Image (cartoon, grey):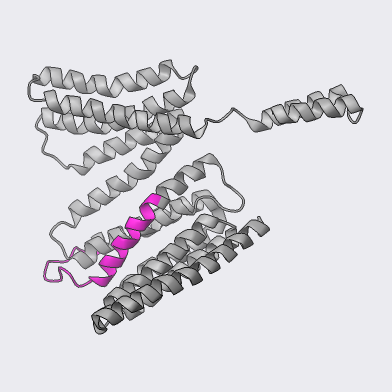
């Protein structure tokens, strides 16, 4: 706005525009710009400050927990849950960033308060219910405050509750039936978060989901790959009922697709293709050899790269390139390296890293430049 103001003053002095037009331009740009954002050092300070504050409070409570009476414990739990939200409300008008940080610490303290309350009253019940209450608190925080940390917590805690319910429901059951559904659902949801921004929409809400999905997509991919490769593990255990398996697959597929439809509408069809790709991993016959699985993962990585080129999103190209490289390296270690001698395997690994890294970097750079030119 300062730069625009200087230009408008110069144009007005030169007679290019009159003062009334300059005032209208200032008003229009000021309204479109919205409230000023925070600089990244302030954001980092607030994030680490909130993390250290929450950790210090929980450590203090844990250190003095045994010396407190049940009444003092419950009063302390209520105080922890309320004090941060009250502090956030008090500073909301003066410093919105500080208010968002305090409200986030309050939502984190809510989870600790729920489980500490269960310990105080010796509640040995269905433990995923505590995660559900915590997730409801985060969803309520997002609905009332519309703050991005509350959205991030809700985006993490709601899937955590569903995953905990599924783990309890499929405990002591065959891994191919239980963990396979969980792996597919987590991967598809992480991908839905990661692909939240597109060529048409890239607001702050979608950026938060992008970061959540970007952090979760790597571990979710590893978990899906492990479960698809070890699909026969625990086959001697009893299988869950057909109704439970059908319910699990329905939630694992429909939940992420509902998130994608909420974000993209009819343009969410690539997420449906990705969900089908993830479910098809378990249909591949991995017992006779894992080559087909590696080919399938390589095709998925290339599809993610093509998706990024189509939507002009560089992070999808980078993630797809990373997944493709990880697939090639895993294939070399598991299928090639053990069939060669020690020196030959090391030479091959060096050639793979040098030549493959160079080729992959060139292709990635060319695709990123293509997305910059089209955006």
Identify the image quadrant of the N terminus.
top right
Q: Which quadrant holds residue 235?
A: bottom left
| Residue 128: x %, y % from top left | 22, 43
Front-most of residues 309 and 347: 347
- Labels in figure, total: 0
Does 191 sit left or right of 241 as displayed? Answer: right
Q: Residue furthest right?
A: 15
| Residue 357: x %, y % from top left | 45, 68
Q: Which residues are magenta?
A: 215-242
In reply to whether residue 297 is colored magenta, the answer given is no
316 over 5 or under it: above or below: below
Identify the image quadrant of the C terminus.
bottom right
| Residue 195: x %, y % from top left | 49, 54
| Residue shown at 45% from the left, 74% from the top | 355
Does 338 sit left or right of 302 as displayed? Answer: left
Front-most of residues 345 and 35: 345
| Residue shown at 48% from the left, 20% from the top | 95
Please say whether residue 252 is visible from this viewpoint. Answer: no
| Residue 342: x %, y % from top left | 24, 79
| Residue shown at 41% from the left, 47% from the top | 212
| Residue shown at 22% from the left, 67% from the top | 176
Does 265 sit left or right of 249 as displayed? Answer: right
Front-most of residues 232 and 342: 342
Please say whether residue 177 is visible from this viewpoint. Answer: yes
């Amino acid at each position: 706005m300062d730069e625009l103001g200087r230009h408008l003053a110069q144009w007005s002095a030169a007679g290019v525009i009159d003062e009334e037009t300059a005032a209208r331009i200032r008003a229009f740009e000021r309204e479109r710009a919205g409230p000023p954002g925070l600089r990244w050092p302030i954001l980092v300070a607030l994030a680490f400050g909130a993390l250290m504050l929450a950790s210090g409070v929980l450590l203090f409570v844990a250190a003095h927990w045994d010396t407190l009476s049940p009444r003092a414990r419950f009063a302390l739990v209520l105080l922890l849950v309320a004090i941060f939200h009250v502090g956030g409300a008090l500073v909301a008008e003066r410093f919105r960033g500080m208010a968002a940080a305090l409200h986030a610490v309050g939502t984190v303290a809510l989870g600790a308060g729920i489980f500490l309350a269960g310990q105080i009253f010796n509640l040995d019940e269905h433990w995923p219910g505590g995660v559900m209450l915590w997730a409801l608190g985060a969803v309520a925080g997002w609905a009332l405050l519309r703050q991005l940390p509350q959205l991030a917590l809700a985006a993490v805690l709601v899937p955590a509750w569903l995953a905990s319910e599924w783990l309890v429901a499929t405990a002591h059951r065959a891994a191919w039936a239980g963990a396979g559904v969980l792996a597919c659902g987590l991967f598809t949801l992480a991908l839905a978060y990661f692909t939240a921004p597109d060529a048409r929409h890239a607001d702050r809400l979608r950026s938060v989901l992008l970061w959540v999905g970007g952090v979760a997509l790597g571990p979710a991919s590893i978990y899906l790959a492990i479960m698809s490769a070890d699909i026969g593990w625990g086959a001697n255990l009893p299988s869950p009922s057909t109704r439970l398996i059908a319910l699990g697959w329905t939630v694992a597929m429909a939940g992420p697709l509902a998130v994608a439809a909420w974000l993209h509408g009819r343009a969410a069809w690539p997420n449906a293709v990705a969900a089908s790709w993830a479910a098809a991993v378990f249909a591949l016959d991995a017992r006779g050899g894992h080559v087909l699985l590696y080919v399938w993962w390589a095709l998925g990585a290339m599809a993610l790269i093509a998706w990024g080129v189509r939507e002009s999103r560089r992070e999808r190209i980078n993630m797809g390139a990373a997944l493709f490289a990880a697939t090639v390296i895993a294939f070399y270690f598991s299928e090639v390296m053990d069939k060669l001698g020690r020196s030959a395997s090391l030479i091959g690994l060096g050639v793979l890293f040098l030549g493959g890294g160079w080729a992959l970097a060139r292709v990635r750079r060319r695709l990123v430049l293509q997305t910059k030119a089209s955006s």
